[in-house]
Image (spheres, rainbow, N blue to C red):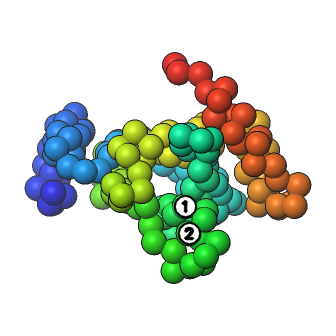
Amino acid sequence: LKLELLEDKTIEEIKYIWLEYHKSKDCISAILDTKQYDELMKTAREHPIFIFPIPRNQGYEFIMQQFAGNTIHFTTLLCYQVHKENAPECLNVTHYTEFRDKGIILMRGEYDPKVLSPQEAQCLINQLQLYYCKNDPSKLALLETFTKTPDKFKHMDIIRELENIKIE
């Protein structure tokens, strides 16, 4: 999608075109308002790396995410432990800030269907928003522990957070 073709459109038209364009693609998309995006990036500066669980057949698999500018790279924790910075991505999320002056940020996430289903990719994005955009004290405490005192971090705590998510 050529973003320059959207420049003269209204916010509602941009949102509609962006979401419709991505419906038929193997990716996920969303629109954030600038307040959400600014909160995301503020939290990301303090906590650029974190892990999220995704439910699997026999329990959970942990996915590590790392911020790099407007992009967030996700890889399985197992791949990261084996390959370090050369670990293959299972999800790559890019934020497009071209329409910041209109109050919106466009987001696209491209996932590897051999590793993640569309629902699992969406689950990761939902968790990212809950931890990085919502200012939730229990989730911020987990980010703090993971970043500043990793030896005290307990994987079961983030599984418990995932299991306790309320659908609003």
Decide which of 56, 165 is in the foreground and name it. 56
Compared to residue 130, the image places residue 167 above or below, namely above
| Left or right: where 6 falls relative to 149 | left
Q: Which residue is mark 2?
A: 79
Tell me, for residue 35, which label it has, or none: none
Name the residue located 77 percent from the left edge and 56 percent from the top edge: 146
- Give left or right: position of 163 versus 149: left
Which quarter of the picture shows residue 30?
A: top left
53 shown above or below 5: above
Q: Amino acid at mark 1?
A: Thr
In this orientation, which residue lies closer to the viewer: 33 or 101?
33
Q: Which residue type carries mark 2?
A: Cys
The residue sitting at the front extreme is 58
Local SS, label 1 = strand
Q: Is residue 80 above or below residue 13?
A: below
Is there a contact, CB below 8 Å, between mark 2 and mark 1?
Answer: yes
Instruction: Identify the disc placed on residue 76.
Output: 1
Q: In percent of the image, x 63 and y 35: which residue is there?
A: 162
Measuring from the top left, give residue 22's x and y in whole percent: 21, 46
Along the horizontal axis of the image, is 65 left or right of 50? left
Q: Quadrant of residue 76?
A: bottom right
Which structural element holds mark 2?
helix
